[in-house]
Amino acid sequence: MLDTRAVGVLIVMCGLVVIGQVSAGQVEHHHTTIQLENAWARRAPSMVQGGQSGQGGGAMTAGNGAVYVTISNHGSKADALLSASTDVATTVELHATVEQGGKMVMRPLPKFDVPAGGKLEMKPGGYHIMLLGLKQDLKAGETLNVGLSFEKAGQMSVEAPVK
Ligand SMILES: [Cu+2]
C-alpha cells in the first residue's frame, strides 16, 4: 500500500519549485530598469543668445525651450536615450553644454548614454533636451508630456512641469 501522506508532501514540494522559478523570472523583467525623475521644462536658456545679459524681457519671439530629466538605469546593461519628442516644439534635439574657447556652447549629441547601475542627470549648463521652434509659449504651471525613446527600454514618457 502507498503512503498517501508521503505522496501529498511530494506534490506540495513540486508546487513550491514551480512557484520559485516563476518569481525568479519576474525579477529579470527589464522594462522597469529605467527610472525617470525630476522632470521639468523652461523657456530658452539665456545662454542661447549669448552677449550681454538680454535687453529686458519679451524680446524673444516663439523661441526655444529645454527639458531636464534625471534618468537612472537599475539594470545590468547599459542603455541610451536615442531621441525625445513633444507636441509643443518643431524640432527636439539632445544637447550637451560644453566650454569652447572660454564660452559655453551647446552641441547636439546622437544619444545620451546611461551606464548600467548609473544615472544621467540633465541640468542647466549640462545635458538637456532642446526644444527648437516652440509652437506655443511655455507658461509656468503648465505640464509638457515628453516622449523618450531608449535603445533597450523602448518608448517611455514623462510629465515635465514648466518652471
Ligand atoms: Cu540646447
Image (tube, rainbow, N blue to C red):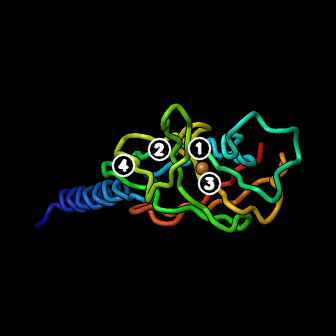
Sequence-first tag of 1 and 2: 1
- As measured in the structure, the alpha-carbon distance from the residue carrying label 3 to the one carrying label 2 is 20 Å
Residue that mark 2 sits on = 72
Residue found 68% across the figure and 54% down from its top: 159
Amino acid of disc 3? Met
The residue that mark 4 highlights is: 75
Some atom of ligand 1 lies within 8 Å of the CB belonging to the residue at label 3: yes
Whether pointer 3 and pointer 2 mark residues with C-beta atoms closer than 8 Å, the reply is: no
Residue 130 vs residue 122, the one in the foreground: 130
Q: Residues within 10 Å of mark 1 (few under 14, many from 20)?
A: some
Q: Which residue is mark 1?
A: 37
Judging depth in this view, the residue of 156 and 55 nearest the camera is 55
Mark 1 near mark 2, Cβ–Cβ under 8 Å?
A: yes
Question: Which residue is situated farthest in the left direction here?
Answer: 1
Q: Residue 114, percent across and down? A: 40, 48
Please, what is the three-letter code of the amino acid marked with disc 1? Glu
Mark 3 or mark 4: which is in front?
A: 3
| Front tag of 1 and 3 | 3
The residue lying at 19 percent from left, 62 percent from top is: 7
- Quarter of the figure that contains the N terminus: bottom left
